[in-house]
Amino acid sequence: MFYVYILECADKTLYVGSTNDLKKRLYQHNNLKSGAHYTKIRRPVVLKYSQKFRTYAKARAKEAEFKRLSRQEKMLLFL
């Protein structure tokens, strides 16, 4: 399975990403140097939303779609 996810950073900004191992990726974002630079300087991050997909292509397409949304539109997904 593949996942698209939205994180809320400590500064209240939102980050959208995709992965095939959500638990591992959340750990990386919060603890390792291999986490995305954006989240690495805005720790801790909290998982606010995730969605499963069967293929990587579908997950990446949804990630791109989410990245085009406004902050308010993204927040509507998890409020």
Image: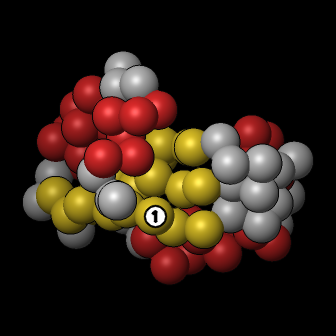
Note whether 33 is above or below 11 in the view shown.
below
Note whether 38 is above or below 12 in the view shown.
above
How many marks are shown on the rendered structure?
A: 1
Q: Is residue 79 visible?
A: yes
Q: Judge from the rendering whether residue 15 lies leftward or rightward of residue 67; answer left or right.
A: right
Image location (x, y in percent) of residue 46 = 60, 68
11 or 51, which lies in front? 11
33 or 68, which lies in front? 68
Check the image and tell me how it is coloured.
Answer: secondary structure
The residue depicted at 40 percent of the width and 46 percent of the height is: 75
Q: Judge from the rendering whether residue 31 lies leftward or rightward of residue 29; answer left or right.
A: right
* Residue at mark 1: 48
Note whether 26 is above or below 72 in the view shown.
below
The residue depicted at 74 percent of the width and 39 percent of the height is: 38
Image location (x, y in percent) of residue 28 = 69, 67
The residue depicted at 65 percent of the width and 42 percent of the height is: 13
Q: Quadrant of the C terminus?
A: bottom left
At numbered mark 1, what does the secondary structure look like: helix, strand or loop? Answer: strand
Q: Is residue 36 visible?
A: no
Q: Judge from the rendering whether residue 38 lies leftward or rightward of residue 7; answer left or right.
A: right
Image location (x, y in percent) of residue 20 = 37, 64
Hey, which quadrant is residue 27 in on the image? bottom right
78 or 51, which lies in front? 78
Q: Tell me the crowding category of disc 1: few under 14, some 14 to 19, or many 20 or more residues within 10 angstroms, Cα based.
A: some
Residue that protrudes farthest toward the left in the picture? 54
Hey, which quadrant is residue 15 in on the image? top right
Q: Judge from the rendering whether residue 7 lies leftward or rightward of residue 6; answer left or right.
A: right
Image location (x, y in percent) of residue 55 = 16, 52
Q: Amino acid at mark 1?
A: Lys
The residue depicted at 80 percent of the width and 72 percent of the height is: 31
